[in-house]
Amino acid sequence: MEHLQQSFNIRFEYKVYFTSGLFDISNKLFSDFLNGAAVAGIPKKILFVVDQGVFDAAADLKEKLKIYFDTYKEVELVQDIITVPGGEEVKNETKYFDEILQAVNTHKIDRHSYIAAIGGGSVLDLVGYAAAVSHRGIKHIRIPTTVLSQNDSGVGVKNGINYFGKKNFLGTFAPPVAVFNDEVYLTTLSDRDWRSGISEAVKVALIKDPAFFSWLEENAGALVSRDLKTMNYLVRRCAELHMQHIAGLDPFETGSSRPLDFGHWSAHKLEQLSAFEVLHGEAVAMGMALDTVYSNLSGLLSDGETERVIGLLQKLGFELTHPLMEVEDPESAILRGLEEFREHLGGRLTIMLLNRIGSGTEVHEIDTDILRLSGIKLKTY
């Protein structure tokens, strides 16, 4: 049969910058980026969407932004800076998505302009999605403010909001034009948010880098005591590992293999069941604990390495399980997370398990009897 064949490649490039005091007048990093991306003769605007928690911790941010863009005039600052709640609430309510689209329309933000998000991972997800679908793609700048967003979600290519009560049901794969990690924001976090983000570092170390896992074991005390230099290394190494993975064979996840989702099938469901009272990083820690013990009981992971994983999570201060994580009952709500995860993967269940620290293996079914025993064993730690 006659047909036309279409094939083309698109190259994506973006940098992740590490800095301190991004919008201090003495810091020209952001200005230099905008200047380097300028196209002569084309006026540009920048619209900011900011996590309310960031403003709560830095009440002078609006004034700093205005002074910064009055000083460095590469783009026109939209004076109407949008404020949205942090956390999953902002992804659950479509009114925040609509508010950003309305601002794009009102302020005539075009494809030569920028939408910049300052906040945690949920805010970055929301704003990235709005940017990706407005005019089929407005340039998006991410400024992550939590450990979790600086070392994981903020450096990736995913955007999305929750819909039909399902996490990230609507979304896009759309890389940002740049990411700016500012260490100052980390100093404003609560102990709970500081700790929560460390779980994703444990995750990526478990499946990709045994030396990094050993480093986490050695530096757990410094991380818990909020040593900023130690956290900066964690963020940078974790971001590096994530970016290496994204640059692999399937950056937009067209298949069912999601190694970076280790521990996530139950974590996503736990977040939903708890009405997002359990933070994402806390849920991931519990999901990793469950899947680590399952790996052990199914004969993949040694007793010694299992003890190391559980020991590190405990040393970092994570809870290993939760009343809503009960898997002993075949009708348990958490088990519905397996089916929802299969649907999210496109029809074929693929779960990453561990065969040793730093190396994972994928399985396409879960033995519920072993899973039940895993839940029972977790309670003994």
Image: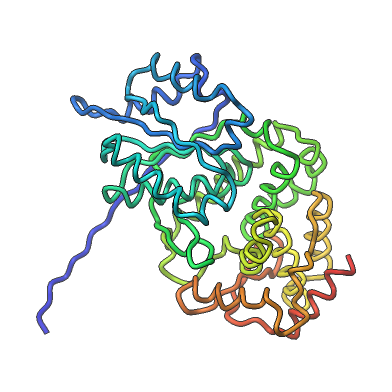
Place residue 41 in its image quadrant.
top left
Q: Is residue 34 above or below residue 130?
A: above
Q: Nearer the viewer, residue 296 or 323?
A: 323
Residue at x 41% of width, y 68% of height: 254
Q: Is residue 111 above or below residue 243?
A: above
Is 211 situated left or right of 337 in this image?
A: right
Residue at x 79% of width, y 54% of height: 318
Question: Image quadrant for the N terminus?
Answer: bottom left
Q: Is residue 298 above or below residue 215?
A: below
User: Measured from the top left, where is residue 126 in percent x and y?
Assistant: 46, 49
Question: Image quadrant for the C terminus?
Answer: bottom right
Q: In the rendered picture of this protein, how many numbered marks are placed on residues?
A: 0
Q: Nearer the viewer, residue 311 or 334?
A: 334
The color scheme shown is: rainbow
User: Measured from the top left, where is residue 63 in percent x and y?
Assistant: 49, 19
User: Measured from the top left, where is residue 11 in percent x and y?
Assistant: 31, 49
Place residue 55 in its image quadrant.
top right
Place residue 221 in its image quadrant.
top right
Hey, which residue is sitting farthest front in the picture? 95
Hey, which residue is sitting farthest right in the picture? 380
Residue at x 57% of width, y 80% of height: 364
Q: Is residue 98 above or below residue 293?
A: above
Q: Nearer the viewer, residue 317 or 260?
A: 317
Q: Nearer the viewer, residue 213 or 346?
A: 346
